[in-house]
Image (tube, rainbow, N blue to C red):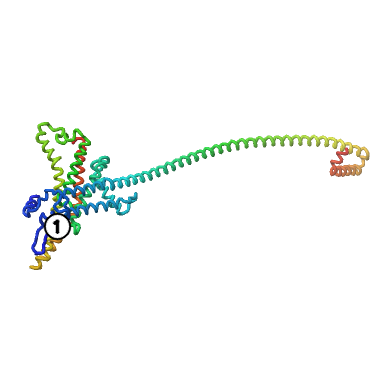
């Protein structure tokens, strides 16, 4: 992708994330490679969970067990653990959606021929973060219609002169920084992961096929970069799962904080 | 890293990755909504149904086990009660048997005593009768003997020793003969 036919080494650039349009070029409905990968991830999610839950049995088979394990992970370990059974059930669709959307769209970064995470342009992380943002504000307003913003911005038990400092901090940290950090954490993880992998494999390509014509020893560097590329591919797998977990967990924590009596 | 990327973006005179393009947002939103509705309307209800079924099955099994245990306990209780009843019955029967045996024993004893008394009195009566009969017969026989002897003495000469001895002998022989048919002799006399 980064090496062209002229044989020189080209490092990865930010253009990686702005591939040429494939459909509807120039409109607001432009579809490029990354958007197609996003669609593919959606199809994969639907396929896996539709097949996995189509004929559910009380005593599960192998595939159903795996699907159940995934759904149980978000249900028990994230939603019910933090929110309790009742609220956990209310917000479970959102939490499950966020977890599996992030997971499946992250994982495309290391799938051959896709090779880029569907979360590596800002649209998807931003949409998910805004959904989380709306969810926790909604949760807070439903639970404490009158007191939510008051408790959030003017924490009880603080002497009133301190509100001059505390209130702007709370406003920014709760209502501004939370969606931004959610977005950027995921986006940057995916962008950097992709750039690292491209860097390693582009270098491998360069060392094996271009530099080795100058001296065969350059191939050894190629072996090194290939090994690093392999290790970082595994690392990206870890990051993909971890970021999905972190995104879903933080969304749940924000909802939990909004639901808490003493905010 | 953010700085580097923005710088890199600036160098390449390309877009800033932090500025979302409209198409990016729109398609992301579509994907999100599709996935959300998919989980919300299809997957999670299916999962919930399964979990309900599973817990119902588990509860059903527990209930079944409870019922079986209760049944077993009831059976045991019934059995114990029956056993106690049977024991009581046995004790009653035994007691009854003992009193019966005692009663029968004493009855038999009384009966035997009465029988013995009766046999004894009968025997006494018989003995008394025999004695009386013997006494009567003896008395008459002794008289007859005395009369016989006296008549013999009177009929013969008693001076002659030889005759006297012969008389006595004859008397004794008669006596012997009459002894062998004593009953007839006594009856006739």
Callout 1: SS = helix
Which of A198 and B105 lies nearest the eye of the viewer? A198
For residue A102, say whether it is visible: yes
Along the horizontal axis of the image, is B86 left or right of A89? right
> Residue B151 placed where, x, y %?
91, 37
- Label 1 resides on the chain identified as A
Which of A201 and B96 lies nearest the eye of the viewer? A201
> Residue B187 placed where, x, y %?
86, 39
Give the number of marks.
Answer: 1
Which of B31 and B132 lies nearest the eye of the viewer? B31
Above or below, A77 against A215 in this view is above
Q: Quadrant of the N terminus of chain A?
A: bottom left
| Quarter of image, res B49 | top left
For residue A186, say whether it is visible: no
Q: In the current view of this chain or complex, which residue is farthest to the top? A: A160
Which of A86 and A97 lies nearest the eye of the viewer? A97
Along the horizontal axis of the image, is B20 left or right of B37? left
> Residue A36 placed where, x, y %?
19, 54
Along the horizontal axis of the image, is A79 left or right of A218? right
**Residue at x 93% of width, y 39% of height:** B155
Q: Quadrant of the C terminus of chain A?
A: top left
For disc 1, the neighbor class at 10 Å (few under 14, some 14 to 19, many from 20) is: many
The residue that label 1 is drawn on is A197
> Residue B134 placed where, x, y %?
81, 37
């Amino acid at each position: 992708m980064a090496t062209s036919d002229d044989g020189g080494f080209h490092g990865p650039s930010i253009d990686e994330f702005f591939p040429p349009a494939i459909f509807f070029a120039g409109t607001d409905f432009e579809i490029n490679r990354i958007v197609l990968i996003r669609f593919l991830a959606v199809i994969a999610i639907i396929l896996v969970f539709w097949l996995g839950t189509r004929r559910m049995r009380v005593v599960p088979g192998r595939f159903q067990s795996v699907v159940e394990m995934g759904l149980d992970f978000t249900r028990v370990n994230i939603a019910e653990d933090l929110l309790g059974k009742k609220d956990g059930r209310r917000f479970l669709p959102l939490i499950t959606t966020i977890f599996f959307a992030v997971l499946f769209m992250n994982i495309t970064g290391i799938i051959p021929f896709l090779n880029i995470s569907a979360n590596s342009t800002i649209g998807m992380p931003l949409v998910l973060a805004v959904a989380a943002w709306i969810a926790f504000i909604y949760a807070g307003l439903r639970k404490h219609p009158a007191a939510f913003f008051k408790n959030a911005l003017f924490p009880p038990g603080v002497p009133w002169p301190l509100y001059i400092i505390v209130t702007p901090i709370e406003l920014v940290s709760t209502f501004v920084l939370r969606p931004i950090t959610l977005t950027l954490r995921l986006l940057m993880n995916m962008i950097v992961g992709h750039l690292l992998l491209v860097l390693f494999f582009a270098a491998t390509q360069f060392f094996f096929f271009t530099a080795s014509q100058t001296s065969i020893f350059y191939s050894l560097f190629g072996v090194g970069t290939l090994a690093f590329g392999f290790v970082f591919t595994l690392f990206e797998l870890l990051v993909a799962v971890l970021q999905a977990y972190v995104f879903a967990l933080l969304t749940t924590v924000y909802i939990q904080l909004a639901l808490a009596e003493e905010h | 890293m953010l700085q580097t990327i923005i710088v890199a973006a600036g160098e390449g005179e390309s877009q800033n990755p932090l500025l979302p393009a409209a198409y990016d947002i729109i398609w992301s939103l579509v994907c999100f909504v599709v996935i959300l509705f998919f989980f919300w309307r299809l997957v999670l209800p299916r999962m919930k149904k399964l979990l309900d079924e599973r817990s119902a099955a588990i509860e059903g099994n527990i209930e079944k086990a409870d019922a079986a245990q209760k049944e077993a306990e009831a059976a045991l209780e019934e059995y114990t009660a029956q056993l106690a009843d049977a024991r009581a019955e046995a004790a009653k029967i035994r007691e009854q048997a003992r009193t019966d045996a005692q009663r029968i024993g004493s009855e038999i004893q009384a009966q035997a005593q009465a029988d013995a008394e009766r046999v004894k009195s009968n025997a006494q009566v018989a003995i008394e009768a025999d004695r009386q009969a013997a006494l009567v017969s003896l008395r008459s026989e002794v008289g007859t003997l005395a009369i016989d002897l006296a008549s013999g003495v009177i009929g013969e000469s008693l001076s002659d020793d030889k005759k006297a001895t012969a008389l006595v002998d004859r008397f004794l022989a008669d006596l012997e003969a009459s002894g062998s048919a004593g009953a007839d002799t006594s009856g006739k006399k």
